[in-house]
Amino acid sequence: MESTDIGLWGVPLAILGGAIRVSTPFIFVSLGETITERSGRINLGLEGILVFGAMTAYAVAVMTGSPWLGVLAASATGACFGLFHGWICKFPKVNDIAIGIALMLFGSGLAFFFGKPFIQPSAPDLPAIPLGWWSDVPQVQAALNINVLFIVGAALAVFLWWAFRNTRAGLIVRVVGDSSDAARAMGLNPDTVRLLSTGVGGALAAIGGAYLSLYYPGSWSEGVSSGQGLMAVALVIFARWNPIGCFAAALLFGGAGALGPALQSVGVTQGYYLFYAAPYILTLVIMIMTSSPGRSLAGAPGELSITK
Amino acid sequence: MTDVAVTPSASSARFPPALEWIARRAEGFVIPVVAIIVGMAIFSVFIALLGKSPAQLFDLMWRGGFGSWFSLQNMLSRAAPLLLAALCVALPARLGLVVIGGEGAIVLGGVAAAAAGVWLDGAPSLLVILLMAIAGMVAGGIWIGAVGALRHYRAVNETISSLLMAYIAIALMNQLVEGPLRDPASLNKPSTHPLGEAYRIENIPGMDVHWGLVVGVVACILSWILIEKTRWGFAARIAGGNVRAAQVQGLAVGPLIVGFCALAGAFAGLAGMIEVAAVQGNANGSLVAGYGYAGILVAFLARQNPLAIIPVAVLLGGIDASGGLIQRRMDMPDATVLVLQGVLFIVILFSETFYGRFKIFNPDLWKRSA
């Protein structure tokens, strides 16, 4: 049994496994928010969309028996919420940050309202691929038991990174985000582009929620989200609106979040609750280090209200 | 544009000045009220679609939140923490900052106050309560003051940093309450040592509402005076409008931002102290009750006006208070109230777009239609 007794090596392994498991919702929410913010809007309501997505996915999975239908339904509701945010923010004097906070409240409220009957029944989980088959060590196998959505998220990050540079749609989103005037001069309607970008962002955030309720932690309750939707907004800034950066930052966040439980498993219990704050402290420190007065953040879309 | 500039004298000849005075101020009252009515109507449709009776719902809401002496007291108790939490948003808003992390200052203020109260056990009660309030205000003030300092001196976005700091504050509270400050007797729900009976904030005589309500109302009035009647408030409004212009005028924008944020955090910390001294009796996880987030809602509905915060907090307190009754009588989830708040919030924020669009509120434009 010496191969299973890996001592302190369990800590980095648990962090790696935790990073992969915990990061998936962050990947989807932050990629969605990247698309929205690249078009020049900020949607703080992704938290509410994520919670509603988690509820929808779980409810549909319970009723149909198919977790993938749940994911599909979640992304549809997320798109509706996103389109609603995009539509309401096109009116003059309507503050996109405030509407986001309202949507956060509304989405969570609606999810708790309709989700009450689904707290008890259990839904089928999303499948995972055991990529650790080559190892005899159970910890390695556990760490590399990777969910399909994680792989989809990774592929999506690469695709978006490519698409922002090389496709017509990607260029249109970036032009609108950098200057409404330039976009209008090109004959584009900024409101329509932002509407669609926010809709896509909402759909992706809801998929992140579906992962929460259908895989990890894998159940629906009112505490299903611990602020992933809000943290993803910070994560996007941290990643400088770069989809590949979002993927890396999401892994980092996931790993930081897994630090506490991993250390506890090897007997380090001091400061257990402080380790929960590790991802937040990390983000704050990096934001402080990389910001400076007198210039806006490198890579920030010009029309974005929070960096102006 | 030219006729707008000349019309005031022309129109005052035709309309009584009192009418113009009312018209100019009616906008800020009529639009929110219409928005609330529209929000209620949308919510009624939602309830009716679910096969429930909106009439019964509003009847219960009235009885549970506003209709009797008991429910009025319940409403006021729930409004009390919202007043201070909303100030934490409204004060920085005057400088153009969107601070959404008041929850963190509330939590830390509560922990600091509880620690101070236990540490000073044995001293005269009024002194201890005062020192607890100061401890809570200092803790909250440092927390949000730091957000303001980061904003001004490092250009760190205050919305995001205050949110991150709120999560850090909650983790810090858990660590302290589970560790060094824990009362070994609190088994199921880790808490600090209970405060002595003499150090609890009592109820207002004749009411089942604690003094925190009075503190909150006074804080709102003082904040209004600060913003509207003092030179600091005037400077803050200039800096909120245009930072460069304020700097050209020689205003010390940095201390202004840090000061306003620290004061905002101090009010939130005071809310935490009151929650500990008047409601909980010790600091525990119940401090994370979402008052900070409800405060954002109140502040935005009040359009960041400290005086308007008072009626809005009372209205939301009443809606909140009726939640239990709606849940029991209509067999609906307690989240019903959350849905209503969300609908109201969205509709009222949407109504911002109608300001300045109606001729009736702008006497300068009356002449053209007449």
Image (cartoon, coloured by chain):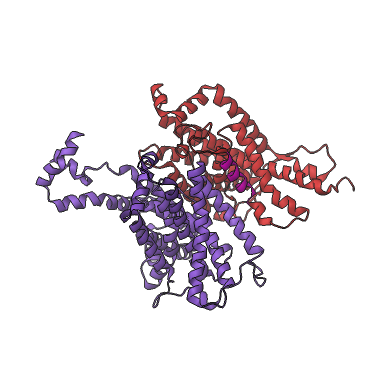
Chain colours: A red, B purple
Q: Which residue appears at 26% of the width and 49% of the height?
A: B27
Look at the image and tell me whether residue A107 can be seen. Answer: no
Image coordinates for residue B84, horizontal then vertical, percent: 43, 60
Whether residue B207 is in magenta: the answer is no
Image coordinates for residue B51, horizontal then vertical, percent: 43, 54
Q: Quadrant of residue B173?
A: bottom right
Direction from residue A2 to residue B173 in the image, left or right: left
Provide the residue span drawn in magenta.
Answer: A277-289
Magenta segment main secondary structure: helix
Q: Nearer the viewer, residue A124 or B346?
A: B346
Image coordinates for residue A95, horizontal then vertical, percent: 40, 42
Q: Nearer the viewer, residue A117 or A81?
A: A81
Vertical comparison of A35 with B238: above or below: above
Name the image quarter holding the C terminus of chain B. Answer: top left
Q: Residue furthest front?
A: B250
Q: How many marks?
A: 0
Vertical comparison of A87 with B286: above or below: above
Q: Nearer the viewer, residue B337 or B331?
A: B337
Q: Which residue appears at 40% of the width and 77% of the height?
A: B205
Q: Which residue appears at 72% of the width and 45% of the height?
A: A15
Direction from residue A176 to residue B222 in the image, left or right: left
Vertical comparison of B370 with B206: above or below: above
Look at the image and tell me whether residue A158 can be seen. Answer: yes
